[in-house]
Image (tube, grey):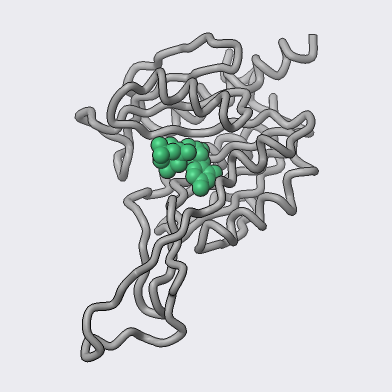
Amino acid sequence: LEKLLRTKDLKGLRVLMTAGPTMEAIDPVRYISNHSSGKMGYAIARAAEYRGAEVCLVTGPVNLPIPHGVEAVHVQAAREMLHAMESRMDGADIIIKVAAVADFYVKNASDHKIKKTYGLPVIELEKNPDILATLGQRKNQQFLVGFAAETRDLSAYSKDKIAKKNLDMIVGNLVSGPDSAFGSDQNTVTFFYSDGSEEALESMPKEKVADKLLDAIVSRMHSRRN
Ligand code: CTP
Ligand code: CA
């Protein structure tokens, strides 16, 4: 019954989100990226659509079908993801940044394939823009959610990111555990809120984490309004 009642509890809300890795070109055939599978983000997009939201998913390259009814925007580099998010943020009620953004891009990316006969290439890295922090600076009424994957000090780092990026909430993930997040169908997360409170969830399928996250967002948005 509880599930039936909340079925369309996101009706009328616009959810803008990101998922997957970003891909930073070294040359036309090579890139720097990470192990993000996109499963967590796609599960959230699917759940939000199911619960009645209008969902726009800005996605890096992953091997997953776009969930039914979800608008997809395909990007590769973090700089493209930034533009896709900045141009859409004004219309959003909820922004969820699940994507594993590459922290660096290749400043001297080559227009042509680098040939090995020219000796060892020097790859110059430059810091990518912090998309989430940019959205945090520019947000008005949007409920802004980040993700954090850490190998230690989850609570301290997560709370630090809430403050630095001006978030309403962050989903913290300890990636050193037995069912660590990357590629897995299970996830063990803790929700941290901007008021300093936190809620640790047990290990559960990513679909269930998605619903718990949307429950938490709905409840926080209600209490913010009242
Ligand atoms: N993020 C972002 N843009 C970046 C880097 C991260 O939007 N250039 C977002 C991620 O999508 C995630 C959150 O910030 O929602 C936290 O990402 P994380 O990699 O844990 O934090 P960083 O700020 O990059 O710090 P570090 O990797 O050094 O821990
Ligand atoms: Ca990072």
Determine whether, in the image, residue 128 is placed left or right of residue 29.
Answer: right
Q: Residue at x 29, y 40 (%)?
A: 184
Residue 154 in which image quadrant: top left
Nearer to me, 198 or 129: 129
Q: Residue at x 52, y 26 (%)?
A: 170
Q: Examine the rendering and report whether any part of residue 1 can be seen.
A: no
- The image shows residue 155, relative to residue 90, as above or below, that is above
User: Where in the figure is residue 2, as x and y percent of width and height?
Assistant: 58, 13
- The image shows residue 113, relative to residue 85, as above or below, that is below
Determine whether, in the image, residue 198 is placed left or right of residue 177.
Answer: right
Q: Examine the rendering and report whether any part of residue 143 can be seen.
A: yes
Nearer to me, 53 or 120: 120
Determine whether, in the image, residue 37 is placed left or right of residue 177.
Answer: right
Residue 79 in which image quadrant: bottom right
Q: Residue at x 50, y 63 (%)?
A: 76
The image quadrant where one finds the N terminus is top right
Nearer to me, 208 or 157: 157
Residue 166 in which image quadrant: top right
User: Where in the figure is residue 110, as x and y percent of width and height?
Assistant: 43, 80
User: Where in the figure is residue 180, as x and y percent of width and height?
Assistant: 27, 34
Q: Residue at x 48, y 12 (%)?
A: 198
Q: Residue furthest bottom?
A: 117
The image quadrant where one finds the C terminus is top right
- The image shows residue 226, relative to residue 158, as above or below, that is above
